[in-house]
Image: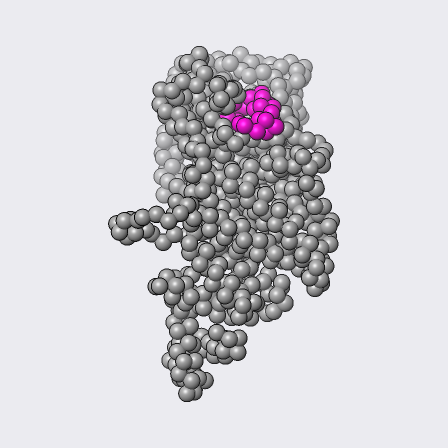
Amino acid sequence: MTQPRPHDITQLLAKWSDGNQSALDELYPLVYDELHRLARRYMSRERRGHTLQTTALINEAYVRLVDQKNVHWANRSHFFAISAQIMRRILIDHARRHAYAKRGGGAQQVSLEEVAAITPDPGRELVRLDEALKSLAEMDPRRSQVVEMRYFGGLNNEEIAGVLKISENTVTRDWNMARAWLYQQLSETAAN
Amino acid sequence: MNPERWQQISRIFKSAISLDPEVRNAYVVGQCGSDESLRAEVEKLIASHEQASDNDFIGGIAAEVAAPLLVDEHEDGPPHRALSDGQQVGSYVILNTLGAGGMGEVYLARDTRLDRTVALKILAPDISTDKRRMQRFRQEAKMASSLNQPNILTVYEFGEVNDLTFLATEFVDGETLRDHLRKNKKLKLSEILDINIQVLAALDAAHEANIVHRDIKPDNVMIRRRDHVVKVLDFGLAKVTEKRHTTVKDEDSEAATAFKTAPGMIMGTINYMSPEQAQAAAIDERTDIWSTGVMIYEMVSGLLPFKGATDSHTIVQILEKDPVPLTNFTQRKVPAELQRIVAKSLSKSPDERYQTAKDMLIDLRALKKQLDVDAEIQRTSSPTTPIAAVRATEVRSELSKRRVLVVALVGMAIFIAAIFGIYSWRASRAKQNKPAVDAPPAPVAERTLTYWVTVQKYKDGKPYQGPFTLAGEINFEQSYQIRVNVQSAQAGYLYVLNEGPESGRPEFVVVFPSVTANNNSPFVPAKQVVQIPDKTWLQFDSEQGVEKLWLVFSQDAVPELETARQYASRQTRNLITDAGQNKVVQSFLATHSTTKPGLEKGETQTTLKSAGKLLVYAIRLEHH
C-alpha cells in the first residue's frame, strides 16, 4: 500500500473546492481508506468508558493526509465535508452490523416478555436516520448535506456555509427544516 | 412527495417558524388558502420542529450514539484476561483490581520477593501481541525505570510470565489530579503552583534523560493522599526523544502511527496537545511545557484554554487562537506574573516557549515564594483585620513589660513600606531565589558588613514626612519607627539579636533570621540587602534607654546562636525566655565583641570590617 502524500491530497482538495468533481472521485477512496484504517485501529484499542469522537478520527486523518502549510480554510472545510460523508458510511455500516448481530444473525423466536424488554436500540435508530436522510436527499440534496456535515462530521454552521457557499442563516433554516422532517419521518416509522 | 410540493411546504414552514405562535396560525392559513392537505403537512412539520427542538433531536453528533455500539462490538470479541485475587503472576500475588488503564487492566499486587505493594499493569493482548510495539515498550520501560525522581512514578519491572506481559510500578495511594479537580472546583493558587512545580520537577528529570512524556494531562498526575506528593504517571508510554524527525516507511506506518500519535489522541484528550503534536510534526520536550501550561490554565480558570464545539474546532484553536488571558477572569485575582508564565508556555512556536522544564520551574517557584510573602504581608500588616489588631495589642502589652525593642505591627507600615521598602526588599528576595542560595560560602579572611537605619517619624500617631536613612547611633524619639538594613560584602551567616535596655538580666529577641525573615535561614548571599524586620517596623516601646541590636556575621553557622534561634523560633515574637539560652547568647556575644571591628561611618551608612571569619557588633539605638 502506498501512503497518499500530503501534497497530492492537498492539491485534490484545492481542485475539488474549485469545482472539479473528478478530483472528488480521486479523493474519496484515499480519505476513506485512511478514516477506515483509523476507525479500525480505534476499535481495536477501544476500552470501556471511552467515548468515540468521530471528529478526532477525521482530524487525525486530516493532519496525516493534508499538507498543513499549503491548505486554505476552504480546503479544510471541504476535507471535513467529505470526511463527514465517509464517517457516516463507516458508522452506519457498523450500526447495521450491530443491529444484525443483536438479532443473533437470523430470525429467531422471541417471547413476548423479551419483546417488551427491548429498549430503543441506538444502532437501529442510526440506521433509520440514515434511511430517512437518503429519502431527504432525493427531494432536497442540500438540506440532507447540511445534516450530514453537522451530525456525522461535526462541522459547525459557519463551516457548512463555507463548503456549500450559502449564508449561515440559510444553513440554520435548512437545518430546522431538515431536522423537523427527519423527526417526523422517524416518529412515523417508529409508530408502524 | 414531489419536489414542487416540497418546495412549497418548505417556503411556508421557513417563514412560519420565524413568526410568533399567535400570528403563525393565521399566516399558515393565509398561505395555504383552500389547500387543506398542504396546510396539514405544514402544521405537522411545525409540530415536529417544536418536538425536535424540545427533545434536542440529533442535537449531538452521530459518533456519540455510535460509540456504545463499537464498544459492544468489541466486547463480543475475545474478553480481556481477568486475574482474580490471590492469583500469582511471577513473584506477584494479586490483591485487588485497581481499574483499567490505557494499556490494560491494573491490579494491586504484592511483590513476594521484596515484600512490597505494587501496581501491576497487565498489558492488553492487542499491545502485547504486537512484536514491534512490545519492543518499543520494553525499551521505554527500561528508560522509564532508570528515572529516579520523587515526582515520577517508579517503574520496578517490566516482564513476561507465561503469555502475560506486565509492568510493575510503585503503588500510589491517592487520586488523580483529574479527580482532585472534579472534587475541588477552585484550588488555591498556592496549591496549583505547588502541584505544577512538582510536575515540572518530574519533567525536568525525564527531559534530562531524553524522555519526553508526550501526554501530560490531569489524568496522568497523581496526588498521594498521605502527603500530597505529586507523581507523574505513564512515562512508560513516552517515546524516547528522537532529535530528528524520521520519515516512516509504509510498512512501518501502522505500528509507527501508534507512537507517532500521542496516546489517547483519538480517545478524546486532544485538549492538552501541543500545536506540533496536532500537526503530527516532530516533537521534543517542549511539547510537555505546552501541556503543563494547559494544565495550569485549566486549574486556575476552571476552563480549558483550547476547547471547541468539536475536536476539529479544538485543533484549529490550538493551532491558531490565543487563549483568553487568565487575568481577564473575574472569579479570582490572577497575578500578572502567572499569566506571563502561562502565556509563555503556550506560545505556538516551541522556540518561544520555555526551553526547559527547569526554567519554567524556577519562575513558578519564584512566583510561589512571592505569593507566600505577599500573603504574609497582607496578614501581618492590615490594621483592619481583628487578628492584626489583637496581635499588636498583645505585642505592646507583653513587650512593654520587658522594656525591649518592640517588633511592632503598625498599621501604617504597609503604606510606608509600599513607598519605600517593599520594592527593594522584593528585589532582594528575587536575588535570593537564585540557586546560589544553596551554595556554601567561599572562605574569605575578612568580614565586611554595611548597615543603615531607615527611620519613619511619627507625629500624633501619624507618619510625618517621608522615611529617611541614617548611619545609626543616633537618638530617636520614642514614637519613631525604624528598620535596620544590612548588606554584607561576602556570603555568610547573619544573626541579628536585640537586647533590651535592662542589661542586668538580659533577654534577647532573635530578629533575624525568623520564620518570616529569610525563610528562617541565617545564610545570606553576598551583596544581598536584608531588612530587619523584613515586613514590619521596629518601634521603641520602653520610654527611654539604649537598645542594642547585635549583628553577628560569620563565615560558618554559629552553633551557639543556631540553638538559640531555633529555640526562639518556637517562642512568641522570637523572644528567648529561657535563662540558660539567654546566658549562652550573652556569653557568646561578650566573648566575641571584645575585638571591635573597623568602622567607617558615612552620612547615611556605616561599614564594619573585621579580620577573620567572624564579625560581632552592637548597634546602639538610644531613644528618649
Q: Residue at the location (41% across, 61% down)?
A: B56
Task: State which region is magenta.
Answer: B128-155
Q: Is residue B217 visible?
A: no
Residue B128 in picture, x, y percent from top left: 53, 27
Q: Residue at the location (62% across, 34% down)?
A: B255
Residue A79 in picture, x, y percent from top left: 63, 55
Could you say which is closer to the camera, residue A91 or residue B188?
A: A91
Could you say which is closer to the camera, residue A142 or residue B461?
A: A142
Q: Residue at the location (47% across, 26% down)?
A: B122
Is residue B130 found inside the magenta-colored segment of the image? Answer: yes
Query: Viewed as shown, does residue B573 lie left or right of B486?
Result: left
Residue A180 in picture, x, y percent from top left: 44, 68
Colour convention: one colour
Could you say which is closer to the camera, residue B343 or residue B557?
A: B343
Q: Residue at the location (61% across, 28% down)?
A: B132
Q: Quadrant of residue B289?
A: top right
Is residue B575 found inside the magenta-colored segment of the image? Answer: no
- Count of numbered circles in the view: 0
Residue B241 in picture, x, y percent from top left: 65, 30
